[in-house]
Amino acid sequence: MPDNETGICIVRSHGMAPQKIKEISDKGYDVVDLTCLDVKKVQQKAIQLAQEDFLVLILGKPEHPEVIAIKANADIYSGNVYVIPDLETLKEITDKIKEHKKVGVVIQTTQKLELLESVVNYIVPIASELKVFNTICKSTSMRQKEARELAKNSDLMIVVGSKKSANTSHLAEILQGITQTIHIETAPDLDLYKEQLVKAQNIGVTAGASTPENIIKSVIEELEKI
């Protein structure tokens, strides 16, 4: 990006590292910050924990832009910030947790509640002080809860949405533990699962938060034809 340019730079809903925002602004661009308010909340909680000298654990996928931005914000105030995608990764820093004693936890807005619960259960016996912020987006939590209930009465669940979407992928993972589940992106993908569809008596359909309504509708219309 050249210096002394004019234009508008939009920060997407996942957020961005503050250092990067400053760099863009310093080059002369107008920055429009469209970071999701729920994501902003996670960033603020992570900063708070870092400022209070907690060892900060960010539960989520290390390569996800939301998590990268959360960590970048907390890193400004502390050198003890770790991204934890699973319990095995957490166990690798057990000694650091015991040494630091004060542990703070935030979680990616689209993550599964099960990850938060497993991490907290592991930390409780080894940390002297634990502060936990459940920063999972309310709409994500509600969607997961409703999908679970639907899955209990279905012998096949169809999750519609991008396979690159964190909340959609997590939704599929959750439902796979309840009933047979397939994850598709668009209606034509149903052709890959015709055998399962024909055999199923009760089919439930759910979708990720970012899945367009017209795609969901087209999937349902295709299912009615089958």
Image (tube, grey):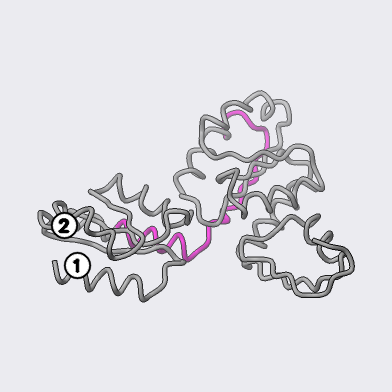
The residues colored magenta run: 124-148
Q: Are marks 2 and 1 in contact (CB under 8 Å)?
A: yes
Is 215 drawn above or below residue 159 in the view shown?
below
Secondary structure of the residue carrying numbered label 2: helix
**Residue lying at the far top of the rendered structure:** 95
How far apart are labels 2 and 1 at the CA level? 8 Å
Q: Residue furthest front?
A: 2
Provide residue 59's location: percent of width, then percent of height.
57, 44
Query: Relative to the observer, which residue lies in front, 164 or 85?
Result: 164
- Residue under the image location 78 percent in, 57 percent down: 20
In the rendered image, which quarter is residue 162 located in? bottom left
Q: Amino acid at mark 1?
A: Leu
Position in image of residue 197 (x %, y %): 16, 57
Q: What's the residue type where badge 2 is placed? A: Leu
Disc 2: which residue: 197
Depicted 3 relative to depicted 59: above or below: below
Q: Is residue 205 above or below residue 72?
A: below
Which quadrant of the figure has residue 75? top right
Tell me the residue that label 1 is attached to: 223
Question: In the image, 4: left or right of 205?
Answer: right
Q: Nearer the viewer, residue 189 or 219?
A: 189
Q: Nearer the viewer, residue 28 or 47?
A: 28
Residue sitting nearer the eye, 27 or 140: 27
In the image, is 190 to the left or to the right of 210?
left
Q: Is residue 133 magenta?
A: yes
Looking at the rendering, in which quadrant would you find the N terminus? bottom right
Can see residue 120?
no
Secondary structure of the residue carrying numbered label 1: helix
Residue 139 among magenta residues: yes
